[in-house]
Image: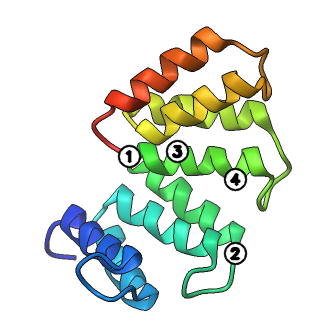
Amino acid sequence: AAGSGGAMSDVGSLYDNGQGVPADYRKAMEWYRKGAAAGSGLSMSGLGVLYANGQGVPVDYAKAMKWYRKGAVAGSGLAMDNIGVLYQNGQGVPVDYSEAMKWYRKGAAAGSGYAMDSLARLYSGGLGTPKNPQKAAKWSAAAAHASQP
């Protein structure tokens, strides 16, 4: 597809969240698909979110995971975080905190503030790891300063 995948993702997000335009999941999906075709990992993650939340389509965790994995391959830390969320919540896969931790770490390494916050919550709650308030605080602070979702 010609054009900027990132810009297409931005347009999809506007329709997804009803920012400046009426919320329209069909249009969001259309723009995310264009962005995904142009290689945007954020667009791929956006498609996954629509499937995971049943926004404009029936809930389908397998399709969500497919799009998140494509987004992760494209380098999207947000997609990596979303894979972790599916494992943490047992959505379409068995609950697996160590797999969630693995994906949150990948997302954090890619700069995702959401992934950093997810790591903080695992350490804070002792989910799949011993409780560690120091690591939780470290990751919360990192998330607060992250420049990307």
Q: Secondary structure at mark 4?
A: helix
Provide the residue designation for mark 2: 60
Q: Is residue 107 left or right of residue 118?
A: left
Provide the residue designation for mark 4: 86
Q: CA distance from mark 1 to mark 3?
A: 11 Å
Contact check, label 2 and label 3, Cβ < 8 Å = no
Q: Is residue 80 left or right of residue 58?
A: left
Nearer-N-terminus badge (4/1): 4
Dividing the picture into quadrants, the one containing residue 148 is: top left
Q: Is residue 17 left or right of residue 4?
A: right
Q: CA distance from mark 2 to mark 4?
A: 12 Å
- What's the residue type where badge 1 is placed? Pro
Q: Secondary structure at mark 3?
A: helix
- What's the residue type where badge 4 is placed? Leu
Q: CA distance from mark 2 to mark 3?
A: 18 Å
* Label placed on residue 149: 1
Provide the residue designation for mark 3: 80
Q: Give the color scheme: rainbow, by chain, secondary structure or one colour.
A: rainbow
Residue furthest right as drawn: 94
- What's the residue type where badge 2 is placed? Asp
Front: mark 2 or 1 = 1
Q: Across the whole image, how many numbered discs are drawn on residues? A: 4
Q: Secondary structure at mark 2?
A: loop
Contact check, label 2 and label 1, Cβ < 8 Å = no
Nearer-N-terminus badge (2/3): 2
Q: Is residue 122 left or right of residue 26?
A: right
- Residue in the image at 77% along x and 34% along y: 97
Residue furthest left as drawn: 3
* Label placed on residue 27: none
Q: Secondary structure at mark 1?
A: loop
Q: Position of residue 128 (x, y in %)?
A: 80, 26
